[in-house]
Image: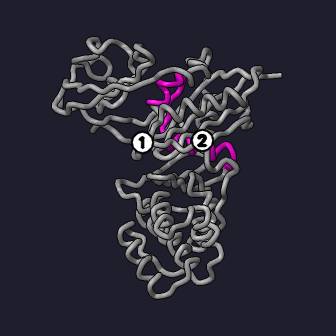
């Protein structure tokens, strides 16, 4: 019996998710955990939980991290592969639904749409600075109504006459919601109106200019909200697929990526990392006018990773600071004209992103 398995970790703005799969993609364990503002601690807690649940006969042969905290998490656990969340979510969906053409992904603080054709990513978009079309929008309004997000979901499903709520901004939404309460609208109609407001905001902002075609898969933490699923169906007039691992699809995709990365010897630091005293320290690079703040990840006194630089020269590097000072990517001297975010998105290219959609340094 093959006891090899692969670990995927998705560290987002709100939650940390872990999935362990067999080489063929079967999910053995999954964990969804609120990050509580401490991504390192949440990753360690997930590893501790996996230590309790994963039988000793299973051996982790590869690890991939993704999400906004992927580099930090990769340093903590010893990741073999680090991928952006667009790649991870797309890979998970393609594994389960090869014919899917659109992916909606809404999390706590960000939202994305990914367009696929013939099993390859051809376009994608993310929200910018506004969180009105994300899970935090619903959380804030649920608190205003003094109900849980689960109650908001169930009450929205009882509505037969949703009221119209302004969803462009959370401030306007709250004012409009108070006004509708004062007019006497029922709470179930207001909650369903909030769901429609989020969907309108998402489709008009994140999906603006994108070719939305079914089959459509909806994932991320907000996909657990039945009111939002109903709002998408009513607005788009088509079925919305909720995958079986909808809350942890990023981690699932990361595990799939790890299993297909031909890892000969894993860098995984072991489940015992959950008990290590891992801290971070910051310093200013100073090699160019950007003066980037670099975050060092330390296990006791050992530097196990760095992140935070705009030119990329510090990312994941563990050499002494003096060895990296004064150098840019690939050992070149840093000039402030070129010291900016440069990302050719090689992992997306591998699954089909057309050249015109890539980010470049030009």
Residue 152 visible (yes or no): yes
Which residue is farthest left? 289
Front residue of 90 and 139: 139
- Label 1 and label 2: CA atoms lie apart by 19 Å
* Residue 87 painted magenta: yes
Numbered mark located on residue 91 in the image: 2
Front residue of 152 and 215: 152
Q: Which residues are magenta?
A: 72-98
User: Is 126 drawn above or below residue 22 in the view shown?
Assistant: below
The crowding category of the residue bearing disc 2, from other C-alpha atoms within 10 Å (few below 14, some 14 to 19, many at least 20), is: many
Which residue is farthest bottom? 183
The crowding category of the residue bearing disc 1, from other C-alpha atoms within 10 Å (few below 14, some 14 to 19, many at least 20), is: few
Q: Position of residue 158 (x, y in %)?
A: 65, 76
Report which residue position mark 1 lands on: 355
Q: Position of residue 115 (x, y in %)?
A: 52, 53
Residue appearing at x 49%, y 47% in the figure: 14
Numbered mark located on residue 216 in the image: none
* Residue 91 painted magenta: yes
User: In the rendered image, which quarter contains the C terminus?
Assistant: top left
């Amino acid at each position: 019996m093959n006891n090899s398995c692969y670990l995927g970790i998705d560290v987002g703005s709100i939650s940390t998710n872990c999935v362990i799969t067999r080489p063929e993609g079967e999910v053995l364990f999954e964990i969804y955990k609120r990050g509580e503002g401490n991504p390192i601690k949440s990753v360690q807690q997930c590893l501790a939980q996996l230590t309790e649940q994963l039988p000793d006969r299973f051996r982790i042969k590869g690890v991939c991290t993704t999400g906004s905290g992927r580099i930090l998490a990769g340093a903590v656990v010893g990741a073999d592969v680090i991928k952006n969340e667009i790649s991870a979510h797309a890979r998970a969906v393609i594994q389960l639904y090869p014919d899917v053409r659109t992916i909606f992904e809404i999390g706590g603080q960000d939202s994305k749409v990914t367009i696929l054709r013939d099993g390859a990513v051809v376009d994608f978009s993310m929200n910018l600075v506004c969180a009105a079309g994300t899970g935090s929008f619903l959380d804030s309004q649920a608190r205003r109504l003094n109900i849980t997000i689960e109650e908001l979901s169930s009450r929205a499903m009882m509505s037969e006459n949703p009221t119209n709520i302004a969803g462009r901004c959370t401030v306007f939404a709250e004012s409009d919601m108070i006004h509708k309460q004062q007019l006497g609208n029922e709470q179930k109609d207001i909650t369903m109106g909030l769901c429609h407001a989020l969907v309108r905001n998402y489709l008009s902002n994140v999906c603006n200019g994108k070719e939305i075609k079914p089959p459509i898969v909806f994932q991320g933490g907000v996909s657990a909200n039945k009111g939002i699923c109903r709002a998408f169906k009513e607005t788009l007039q088509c079925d919305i697929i909720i995958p079986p691992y909808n809350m942890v699809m990023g981690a699932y995709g990361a595990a799939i990526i790890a299993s297909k990365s031909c890892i000969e010897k894993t860098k995984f630091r072991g489940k015992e990392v959950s008990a290590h005293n891992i801290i971070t320290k910051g310093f200013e690079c100073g090699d160019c006018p950007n003066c980037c703040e670099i975050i060092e990840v330390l296990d006791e006194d050992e530097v196990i990773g760095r992140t935070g630089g705009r030119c990329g020269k510090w990312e994941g590097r563990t050499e002494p600071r003096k060895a990296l000072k004064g150098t840019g990517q690939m050992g070149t001297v840093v000039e402030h004209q070129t010291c900016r975010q440069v990302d050719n998105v090689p992992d997306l290219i591998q699954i089909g992103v057309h050249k015109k959609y890539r980010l470049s340094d030009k």
